[in-house]
Image (cartoon, helix red, strand yellow):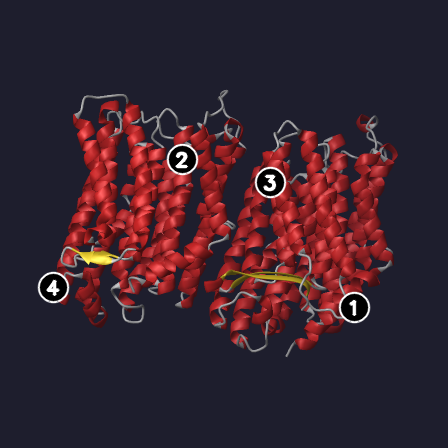
Amino acid sequence: MKWMIFSPEIFYLLAGLWFLALSMLPRAGSGRNYFSALFLAAAGILVCLISVKSAGTLFFNAYQVNLFSQVFKVLLSLGLFLVICLCPNLTAVKAKHHPEFYLLLFVCTLAMMMLVSSAHLLAIYVSLELSSYSLYILVVLRRGKDMGIEAGIKYFLIGIFASAVMLFGMALLYGTTRATYIGEMARVLPGVIDKPAVVIGMLLTLGGFFFKLAVFPFHFWAPDVYQGAANQVAAYIATASKVAAMALLVRMVALTGGAAASKYLVHVLVVLSIVSMTVGNLAAIVQKDIKRMLAYSTIAHAGYILIGILSMSTAGYGAVIFYALSLLVMKFTAFLVAVKVADDDRNLDIDRLAGLHQRSPLLAMALMVSIFSLAGIPPTIGFTGKLFVFLAAMEQGYFTLVLIAMINVVISLYYYLLVLKAAYLLKPDAAVSEIPLSPQAKVLTTALIVVMVVVGIFPGYVLELAEAAARAIV
Amino acid sequence: MTFARFPYLSCILLSCVIGLLIILFLPERRKQVIKWVSAVFSAIPLMFSLYLFLAYDKSTGGLQFVEKILWVKSLGITYFNAADGFNLPNLLLTGIVFFTGVLTMWEMQTRVKEFYALYFLLVTGVFGVFMSMDVFFIFVWYDVSLFPMYLLIAVWGTTRKEYAAMKLTLYLLAGSALILPAIAYLFVKSGMNTFDIVSLMQPGTFTADQQKFAFILLFLGFGILAAVWPFHTWSPVGHVAAPHAVSMVHAGVLMKIGAFGVLRVAIFLCPQGWQHWAQLMALLAAIGIVYGALAGLRQTDLKFVIGYSSVSHMGVVGLGLSTVSADGLNGAIFQMFAHGVMTALFFSSVGYIYDKTHTKAIGELGGLSKIMPVASTYFIVAAMASMGIPCLASFWGELVVFISAFKVYPVRGAMAVGALVISALFMLRVVQKTFYGPKNEQFEQLPDVPFGLAVPRMILVAVLVFFGLYPSILFDVIETASIPFMNGLP
């Protein structure tokens, strides 16, 4: 029965195998792929929810299951399910590649689940690479000659560079602490964290996750990859992949044992946070393509997330976990609107949102709520997430940092409002038809709006869960 | 502190939210139904706020009709509403302006559903700020009341609307960018793990330095919304661009939540900071009064004139707050109420004139009193109130503020009174050019205000005159809060 705690991973592995088998069978209509993916993803959420309270270790303690990892697994399975909801008309990927597309999505999710549970440097590295390689291929799968391939190569090159950096950092960490197990490291690190080699090792190791989260200076890939990848893949990268990166950053930083001991590390993180949010927000102002804009806003959000992480307190980590949920929901909603409006799978210019409030009032409203949530305006989940992060930082005395972050929020509002203006104010150039939404899509959109507002207003339960998860790793 | 037997305050919010939801589910083509729903669900908050104003027990004072529920335990956020002498006049004001605003927009035809939905959202936020006694909720309501403004101005507005909407939103949210860190700072420094104002305002919670530091951030943050000079530039531009009902709410009520935020959050939590920075507050307020009056002299657009006179009048509120005296607080709150009703009347009557003539340029109008005598009367009454003529409500607010200001800041008080003369001058000039003199032939055939549309304006005039004749009704309520508050200061 010990393996019960491994059930989410086993489930996703089997699901992956199912699509592997499908890819070898003669091609049937695309309906079979989509519906089996949707069903499996929904069942996956259930499996993750059932195993949320389980705890234990596997594989000679290299694999650790606790509330922290299980909460993130629920978030990841939710992210996968949502992204698959975007795929009923998956024309951006050739029909013959559909089984592979789903295979890679499931394998990538599996890898991220293993990532959040890994308690050994090697396991972390292997899971991270597995998820990255799945994503490299997913990006390339986009139909059309060059865009996907160009983006894929950029992603790949920067990705392997980041992995190399991370490996070097891990080597340094091992060299200085003589530990590869996370648990052991947590005992040794607090005593030596202010030594130069350890700080550098830690930062380089974090570099691998900075790459995933698109933190400055590992952010260059994000706009190009979002733009080049299929809209659905971009949505996956922007949501699930970010969630996994946040989990790992929290885990690694939690090893250092508090802000008092590791002041050099904190200094660097403060700088990275400020530069990330400022660069992201300033660059987003001039974007015309909505996916590029969202990519830069992701970079800015990475900056806000770092504020929670560098607080190095349970409250800060809890706030980051809450933020992970809010980022997942609000980013996804923005992508949902983009996918629905760009039904021809082209990239979506912000101007093409013109007249959205007439073409589909529901989508326009979803866009409005998600935009306000991204901008951090109450009463949305995005505001609540930011507030918790800022409160945690304030408790550690980072007043200036919070003030800079708030100024950034005001800057970001400018480009978010431009999107809103396009949706509600601009007149479309030519006559455009209503956007047809299936009943399922309507339910999904409404549910997302409700979640963004209701969790924003009643954050109590989710916050308690997030804090309990954070306590599991401190 | 007496708890409510019936949640009147929550019902005010609930009525706005239910109205909002019903409007969202009505189809756009049922315009008339949407308007009636709006009228009914805006009348309910008015009745509740009027009831609360009358039912408030002045002999005991303090917080009444209290509703308190723990919201987020780990952060000590409570849903805490209460009525006291400071917020009752403002709740009543919001009720009046909300209801009359709905009626003012009765003839609107474009995107009616979205307009009323956003309008309801805006007012929900305003009510929330006034009734909440929890800093966290005040901030949330404050932002809720700001963000619908962008769409309301950008979609339904008139002059340079997109520029104005963006400017206004960015300015006001820049204000909240100062408020949030300050609130978080106070929350952390108190060490009490609560956002509850009543607990946080106990003397000794914050050191003098902490209060000085937090106060200036809160004052600037909320002050931007109260159009404190030199952060006022968004306000005339925004007033001019906004549709009439939004101008009414905006100038009538929204700017008041700025001033109210200064009182409820900054002054309540940081009284020593208040005493420390009072000189600066008075200076900025006096400059605002003079600057608004001078800038108003040069305007050629009717709405700009009102916009600058608002800057000037909000300066009077600021001056009242800066005197650090019970009289000053009384005058400031009274002026908030009077100015709210007066500006609502201003924008409501300009709204009618603009709808008919399609111009707000003073030079193009002229002799309107012969063409539309009723519409002109409403504007002239508002103009008289703006000049501070006795028997109208504004007179009392300004009088009390100036008397208390003279005691503390004679020079700045004299400046302010001098500016009042200027503002009387520019109001008279506007009235003379717009309503008297030669008629503009092209407007000859325009109809005067029909009875149905006159109702909201009549309500506003009646309120102005009533509180002009019986100011003590309002002062008695305000004093139940201001005198104990000043006595409680160290």
Mark before the other along the chain sequence, 1 or 3? 3
Label 2 resides on the chain identified as A
Chain name for mark 4: A
- Residue B296: which disc? none
Residue type at the position of mark 4: Gly
Q: CA distance from mark 3 to mark 2?
A: 24 Å
Disc 2 element: helix
Q: Amino acid at mark 1?
A: Ile
Comparing labels 4 and 2, the label whose residue is closer to the camera: 2
Q: Judging from the image, what secondary structure is the residue with disc 3 in? A: helix
- 1 and 2 marks in contact (CB < 8 Å): no
**Share a chain, discs 1 and 3?**
yes
Q: How far from the left and from the top, in percent, is residue A380?
A: 49, 48
Residue reaching furthest to the front = A1
How packed is label 1: few (under 14 Cα within 10 Å), some, or many (20 or more)?
A: some
Please give the label number shown on residue B21: 3
Mark 4–mark 1 contact, CB under 8 Å? no
Q: Secondary structure at mark 4?
A: helix
* Viewer-closest of B416 and B270: B270
Q: Which circle marks residue A175 in the picture?
A: 4
| Residue B465 locus on image (x, y percent) | 85, 52
Whether labels 1 and 2 belong to a single chain: the reply is no
Identity, as a three-letter code, of the amino acid under mark 2: Leu
Alpha-carbon neighbours of circle 4 within 10 Å: few (<14), some, or many (≥20)? some
